Amino acid sequence: MLKAKRTEAVVRALGAMSGTSLDGVDAAVVETDGAAIHAFGAHGYRAYSKEEQAVLMAALGKWAGPEVEAATAVVDRAHTEALAGFEDIELVGFHGQTLAHEPRGRGTLQVGDGQALAEALGVPVVWDFRSADVEMGGEGAPLAPFFHFACAKWIGAVKPVAFLNLGGVGNITWVDPGKAKPEDEGALLAFDTGPANAPLNDLLRQRRGLAFDEGGKIAARGKVATGALELFLAEGYFARMPPKSLDRNDFSEMIELVSELSDEDAAATMTAMCAAAVAQGMEHCPVPPEQVLVTGGGRHNPVLMEMLAVSLDCPVAPVEEVGLDGDMLEAQAFAYLAVRVARGLATSCPSTTGVRALVGGGTVSRPETA
Ligand SMILES: Nc1ncnc2c1ncn2[C@@H]1O[C@H](COP(=O)(O)OP(=O)(O)OP(=O)(O)O)[C@@H](O)[C@H]1O
Ligand SMILES: CC(=O)N[C@H]1[C@@H]2OC[C@@H](O2)[C@@H](O)[C@@H]1O[C@H](C)C(=O)O
């Protein structure tokens, strides 16, 4: 059980994220009053086993039934293990695992039982961050933008910057750090750029039994098929104005576009698709950012980073360049957002998710046995 600590203005929160890559659970501590970041703390990672990944994969796109129940059990077990070792935690932000996301249709589903986690850890848990936003007409994603605003302040940015997350899906947040609050008019613009690593991961798993293209080594030996790239960019999603969001498998047909190509050419082409989707998305920014700061696993791929550097009109760098941790930013985001929810502050606004009005998503579950 976690050791609980007295609540003061600054809360020591632990966030947990299980992303669309299905690789594992990231956990990280943030100290915040819900507005400014006061400190970043310890972090951890608990990988999913191959068997657990298969259970999660089988449940993707499903809303209920035995596959969803099995996935929920995996998510609950992994999070209880991932979060057990942290000390002096006052609040937990538990994103859970997105299994299905259809904001204009059936809604959005993140599995994981926040009440059970609160009982297991002995600390209040904030969870189900996305439903309220969707119920109020929003996309329910991305939610990291309010945290990115606080990060822009933390790094002392003066001019607009963009945070680009390249996980399974890509998302970008344009931030004007000159504004006082994230919900101020013109402070933020955010949306999912397109697929990032998930389609290439899926292709390499199917063809070679690999989890991903480590270091972009396979893509580096291939040639981009421009015809396939053009077909990809003709997808209606890219012409749509933000806000907009994606489900992990919305672009699974990308694999068909490269089905005739060698592994190397397919990897190069899919990597180029990810970069081209970002380049298209940049056109929506109100003014070009001074810098694009890249977070998420994609920043470890030098081929992808080089393609971004070539196709964007502004400098591109991993978030480490400004002292942030690109492997933990999403977990930190849900620690930060949990404090906002507990304080009754908003977690999204019309320019981040398209929601009708400011909304603070999330359910707070307290341990009954505490
Ligand atoms: N060394 C590396 N070389 C190339 N690609 C890498 C490397 N490390 C990670 N990646 C890519 O990044 C992915 C993991 O990214 P990340 O952990 O940010 O995803 P996630 O948080 O699950 O996704 P999302 O942000 O969409 O929810 C891996 O599946 C892989 O495709
Ligand atoms: C529905 C859902 O889980 N979306 C994720 C996913 O992964 C990346 C991208 O698509 C982003 O929109 C979001 O996650 C991040 C953490 C967010 O909400 O900001």
Image (cartoon, helix red, strand yellow):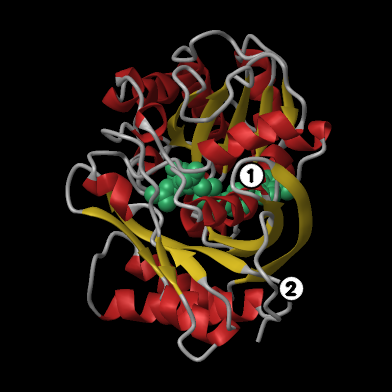
- Residue 19 got which mark? none
User: On the rendered structure, is 164 left or right of 350?
Assistant: right
The answer to whether residue 56 is visible is: yes
**CB-based contact (under 8 Å), mark 2 and mark 1:** no
Can you tell me whether the CB of the residue at mark 1 lies under 8 Å from the nearest atom of ligand 1?
Answer: yes
Q: Relative to 229, is 311 above or below?
A: above
Q: Total number of numbered labels?
A: 2
Which quadrant holds residue 237?
A: top left
Helix, strand or loop for disc 2: loop
Which quadrant holds residue 348?
A: top left
- Considering depth in this image, is 196 or 200 the residue closer to the camera? 196
- Considering depth in this image, is 130 or 233 the residue closer to the camera? 130
The answer to whether residue 303 is visible is: no
Mark 1: few, some, or many residues within 10 Å (few <14, many ≥20)? many
Q: Relative to 35, is 273 above or below?
A: above
Where is residue 367 shown, x and y percent of the image?
49, 83
User: On the rendered structure, is 292 left or right of 111?
Assistant: right
Q: Residue at x 63, y 9 (%)?
A: 313
Mark 2: few, some, or many residues within 10 Å (few <14, many ≥20)? some
Helix, strand or loop for disc 1: loop
Where is residue 272 shown, x and y percent of the image?
55, 27
* Precedes in sequence: disc 2 or disc 1: 2
Q: Residue at x 51, y 24 (%)?
A: 278
Residue type, label 1:
Gly
- Considering depth in this image, is 111 or 87 the residue closer to the camera? 87
Residue pointed to by mark 1: 296
Quarter of the image containing the C terminus? bottom right
Where is residue 8 shown, x and y percent of the image?
67, 61
Q: CA distance from mark 2 to mark 1?
A: 27 Å
Residue pointed to by mark 2: 88
Q: Relative to 79, is 144 above or below?
A: above
